[in-house]
Image (spheres, grey):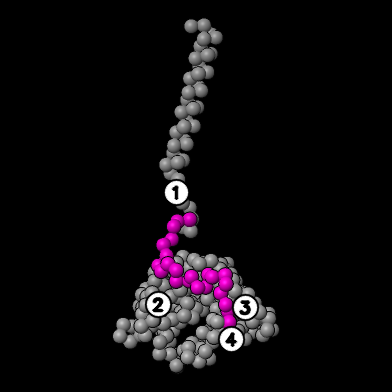
């Protein structure tokens, strides 16, 4: 074999080796491909359509004011007792998740004062616009309305001293992912307070049994499984249909 023939053979041999290596690397890359972000995985709704009314762009806020801010609603008549049980301090940063018409947002903004802050978190655009107007009307510069996702509260990590939900947890369509974002947004030792409806067959009203997804024990289990520590259940004067649970982000 001449020198020129040996050169040609070596060249084709080298080309074959390189091509084989490239093909092998491509196959390995595809075979080892894994999702790197849990948010990229499909999340199953625990109660499809539970927030259909609130996601309606034509939602009429005034109708919900009449439903939410009325003496026949426990969490309205007992609002001062609930506020006292929250043990808010001046300078705290808190989130009112599912702020609705702003009943508790306004009260909490007064409690945390000008050095504190309240993030009024909502999935409903009309509510966010209403919350902005309510804060302006009350001259509360320490309130920020936040439009969130259905599965996240859309706040940065390690921001909050307290997250509060009032008759909202049963509207968490994706509780696992929502709770993960709440845990992230809390500072170490920060509290998560859940006020929601009891669901007791033979005791609770029929519409509550149908509307509310989970009873108190199930709610507690879900929240603890999400990484929170259970602190206590507080008794609130005036509560008959609601409960008040306190959780904490581990230190």
Instruction: Choose mark 2 or mark 4, whichever is in front.
Output: 2
Q: How far apart are marks 4 and 1 (CA)?
A: 46 Å
Identify the residue position indicated by label 4 in the image: 107
Q: What element carries label 2?
A: helix
Q: Residues within 10 Å of mark 3 (few under 14, many from 20)?
A: some
Q: How far apart are marks 1 and 2 (CA)?
A: 38 Å
Left or right, 122 with respect to 234, comes to right
Q: Looking at the picture, does residue 165 appear above or below residue 29?
A: below
Q: In this view, does 214 lie above or below 12?
A: below
Question: Does residue 59 appear anywhere in the picture?
Answer: yes
Look at the numbered discs 3 and 4 and tell me whether their residues touch, using CB distance below 8 Å: no
Write down the residue under mark 3.
Answer: 130
Q: Is residue 177 toward the left or the right of residue 114 in the image? A: left
Tell me the residue that label 2 is attached to.
211
Q: Which range is magenta? A: 40-62
* Residue at numbered disc 1: 34
């Amino acid at each position: 074999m001449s020198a020129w023939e040996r050169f040609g053979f070596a060249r084709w041999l080298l080309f074959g080796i390189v091509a084989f290596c490239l093909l092998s690397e491509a196959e390995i890359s595809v075979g080892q491909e894994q999702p790197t972000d849990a948010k990229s995985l499909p999340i199953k709704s625990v109660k499809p359509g539970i927030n259909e009314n609130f996601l309606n762009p034509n939602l009429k806020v005034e109708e919900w004011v009449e439903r939410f801010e009325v003496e026949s609603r426990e969490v309205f008549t007992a609002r001062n007792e609930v506020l006292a049980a929250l043990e808010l301090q001046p300078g705290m940063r808190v989130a009112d998740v599912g702020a609705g018409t702003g009943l508790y947002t306004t009260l909490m903004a007064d409690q945390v004062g000008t050095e504190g802050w309240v993030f009024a978190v909502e999935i409903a655009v009309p509510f966010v616009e209403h919350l902005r107007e309510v804060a302006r009307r009350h001259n509360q510069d320490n309130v920020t309305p936040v439009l969130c996702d259905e599965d996240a509260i859309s706040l940065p990590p390690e921001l909050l001293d307290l997250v509060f939900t009032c008759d909202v947890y049963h509207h968490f369509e994706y509780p696992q992912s929502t709770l993960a974002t709440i845990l992230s947004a809390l500072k170490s030792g920060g509290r998560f307070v859940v006020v929601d409806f009891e669901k007791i067959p033979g005791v609770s009203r029929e519409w509550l049994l149908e509307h509310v997804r989970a009873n108190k024990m199930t709610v507690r289990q879900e929240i603890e499984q999400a990484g929170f520590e259970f602190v206590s259940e507080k008794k609130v004067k005036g509560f008959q249909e609601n409960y008040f649970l306190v959780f904490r982000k581990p230190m």
